[in-house]
Amino acid sequence: MRILVIGRGGREHAIAWKMAQSALKPELFIAPGNAGMRTVTEQTGAPVTLVNIDENATEALRDFALEKGIDLTVVGPEAALANDIATVFAAAGLRIFAPTAAAARIESSKEFAKDLMQKYHIPTAEYRTFDNYDSAKSYLDEQGAPIVIKYDGLAAGKGVVVAMTAKEADEALRDMLLDNHFGKGKVVMEEFLQGPEFSLLTLVNGEQVVPLVIAQDHKRAYDGDRGPNTGGMGAYSPVPVIPQAQIDWAVEHIMRPTAKALIAEGCPFCGVLYGGLMLTKDGPKVIEFNARFGDPETEVVLPKLKNDLTQMILNVLDNKKVTPEFHPDAFLGVVLAAKGYPGSYVKNIPLNNPASVSQQVFCMGVKEEDGKLHSNGGRVLFVVGRGKTLKEAQEDAYQGVEKMAHPDLFYRNDIGWQATR
Ligand code: AMP
Ligand code: GLY
């Protein structure tokens, strides 16, 4: 069994680590991966090869998969999906667990996602789409603040402005529609929703939807949910503020209908459909969909999963029944990021050996230089604590974080605050 994992971050490290533990005794290839992922071999015994091919070099990845006889490919990053790697691999007769670019529009185009939800009555914030400033501004004058303004397209997580005042909203509209800050495009203006957020990852193939346990991310850079939005500074699972009945409701009324809607629209989904949901006073509503594993949610959800992930993905691809099972333990992980992130950040920070701590460490942005690991990105390491309770998992995680800390790295001290108060 030969597996190819595409991507280079903590998410892909966690996917490889989990898939490597399979009873199918797989051999893993990770393209391009990062030097910190070599520990997968020490931890699981599975051979791991880092392949020096960029995640965006779709044809080169296909040729590599054909040449090596790869049996299954799993894709992490959204950019690879937008390159339509799923269609390219399928055309070459290669098995791949990833949505086509057409299905991945549920993440890449906010307008596509919102129109789909409206047409199929999937609960989400009320919205309107605009491509010119004047009509957007009159809608703003009608609606007032707070209001949410989202650039329709990939904006590296910076295309969302939750405007608490009409002035802020107007600035965002000018920025996006007059100054074309992210390029010439449209904006979606949305009703402001309130409530705790959670991430519901599901393994999907056509109509089949297998929900994993939920997680909660922490998107803001600093303690107290302050500072700029980031890719995510920490995550934990389970999420006690969200009752199980609401999760079940979200699976039946959001995730399954969305999978069906994508079939009806002629772009059936295969891969991970990620619901970014908010529990409002009117029940769960969609904030956004992603067409891939979340990062860092994956790094706490997969440790909680009992099933053999490799077998599970193969079964989903074969449309066989899959029953997910989870460890009762709590998992909580903290990101160590380079000082300055999410702006321009310190580079090439020497790192302590992740294998020297008892906690599981997933390497997010890491490279090897002179035989030692160094940072290679904004988010660098993800340290996962485990415990009977979230409080214990939190203590465990921060013990590991302190050992991995460095003056040029920073981290939030309050990951899990909503669950450990
Ligand atoms: P997104 O990139 O769409 O996930 O948005 C980033 C963050 O903005 C979300 O995690 C929410 O915290 C916030 N947000 C997005 N849409 C809304 C909304 N309609 N109401 C309130 N907050 C929102
Ligand atoms: N952690 C949020 C995301 O993966 O988009």
Image (cartoon, helix red, strand yellow):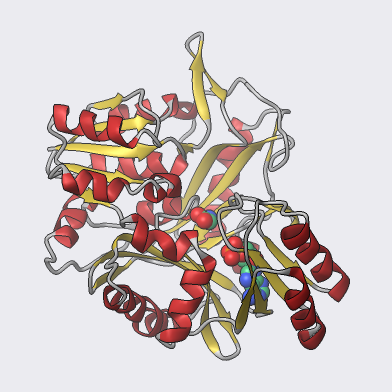
Residue pictured at 33% horizontal, 78% vertical: 261
Pick out the residue farthest to the top. Answer: 370
On the question of residue 198 being in view, the answer is yes
Closest to the observer: 166 or 274? 166
The quarter of the rendered structure image containing the C terminus is bottom right
The quarter of the rendered structure image containing the N terminus is top left
Residue pictured at 76% horizontal, 66% vertical: 173
* Coordinates of residue 43 in the picture (x, y in percent): 31, 32
| Position of 53 relative to 260 (above/below) | above
Closest to the observer: 156 or 249? 156
Residue pictured at 52% horizontal, 87% vertical: 283
On the question of residue 276 being in view, the answer is no
* Coordinates of residue 90 in the picture (x, y in percent): 19, 48
Count numbered badges in the picture.
0
Closest to the observer: 385 or 45? 45
> In the rendered view, does 155 fall on the left or right side of 353?
right
Pick out the residue farthest to the bottom. Answer: 282
> In the rendered view, does 56 fall on the left or right side of 49?
right
Determine which quarter of the picture holds residue 219. Answer: bottom right
* Coordinates of residue 9 in the picture (x, y in percent): 46, 38
Residue pictured at 72% horizontal, 59% vertical: 176
* Coordinates of residue 391 in the picture (x, y in percent): 57, 59
| Position of 182 relative to 319 (above/below) | above
Determine which quarter of the picture holds residue 125. Answer: bottom right
> In the rendered view, does 376 fall on the left or right side of 204?
right
